[in-house]
Image (cartoon, grey):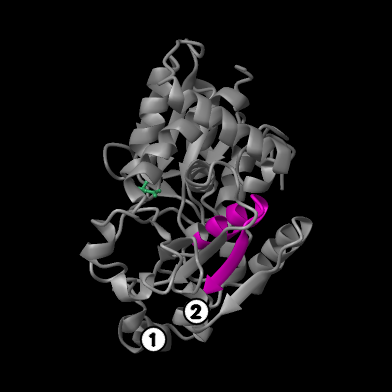
Amino acid sequence: MTAASPKKSGPKSGHFVRLSALDDPALLELVLHAKELKASNYRKPVAKGKMMGLIFLNPSLRTRTSFEAALYHIGAGASVIQPGAGTWTFETREGVVMDGDRTEHLKEAVKVISRYVDLIGVRAFAEMKNLDDDLEDRLMQDIVEYATVPVINMESAREHPCQALADGLTLWEQFAGNLHERKFVLSWAPHPRPLPMAVPNSALEVAARLGMQVTLACPPEMTLDDRVLSYVRSKAAQHNRELHIEHDQKTAFENADVIYAKSWAGPLRYHHPEAEETLRKETYKNWTVGSRQMSHTRNARFMHCLPVRRNVVVTDEVLDGPTALHIGQAENRLHAQKALLMRLWGLR
Ligand code: CP
């Protein structure tokens, strides 16, 4: 490593890469601020002259549009960077000979973008090749090191903290802040594609940190990584709660107040992809959330981060029914991120 190494160049604080960047009081304060911003339909140019660069290494509808809208509402600008779609393709690996089709290294790209903007958002999904790299958020950590302005995680291998903020606001609104006696169930779902674990990791964390009774419902082979579960357990314990893991979906759903459905491929994918594929597509097809499953709950609200595969993850009947929150949950991305931007820019 040279003296000019990027490992020494990035800002040391001000990032929002992990939800844990906010302690519990700060998390709650941000949720309540987002609620206020939503109620007032807040639009004031308090961030006039500020600029955010949004790097999408993977596609997005909600994250991109809600950030662009939030920035516009507070008077800031946005530059969307999509490598390979109007922007040069990025190499992300360290030390490679770049004689292939990737034009520029993230090292240069992130350092240059940092010279133009005040904040960088990054979406970089799990590569799903090495579980340790993904759980350590290796790529996001590299980007944080290259950046010379603060970085927001717009979904990484390990976490989707912006989704968690919106989910926290959605839960708070539904139960008027009385979350302690409410049962939150994160339910695994089948899917044609192997999806990463960022959203389920973050959904469990935010529910536990808001003091809910949290249950992870999944087939045994789809249990999330124990490093994340240990962390969620420790957070639940701070609220005198336990994380329950239940492999029988019906039992998990009993007395639930919230069902949050999500598919993920799980740690098994990294070592036994073919076995994981069969389990996800065939063996556990009956984990689709439908009216029959919802009937075991305490008239639970249904949540999903979107995009969702209808009649694979959840049935039409549930999504089009009165207990579905997914559209309002997506709207809350706007309000939560507006509150986040204002916090990071010291605008309140
Ligand atoms: N939930 C979410 O992050 O949606 P997008 O992938 O569309 O941004």
Location of the C terminus (image quadrant): top right
Under tag 2, what secondary structure?
helix
Q: Is residue 266 visible?
A: no
Are the two marked residues, 1 and 2, in contact with CB atoms closer than 8 angstroms? Answer: yes
Q: Residue at x 57, y 36 (%)?
A: 31
Q: Residues within 10 Å of mark 2 (few under 14, many from 20)?
A: many
Quarter location, residue 234: bottom right
Which residue has dot 2 on it?
A: 222
The residue nearer to you, when weighing 197 against 248, is 248
Q: Is residue 59 above or below residue 315?
A: above
Q: Residue at x 29, y 53 (%)?
A: 322
> In the drawing, does residue 203 fall left or right of residue 85?
right
Question: What's under tag 1, amino acid-wise?
Answer: Leu
Question: What's under tag 2, amino acid-wise?
Answer: Met
> In the drawing, does residue 168 fall left or right of residue 299?
right
Which residue has dot 1 on it?
A: 279
Residue range corresponding to the magenta coloring: 200-218
Residue 314 among those drawn in magenta: no
**Where's residue 294, x and y in %?**
37, 69
| Number of marks drawn | 2
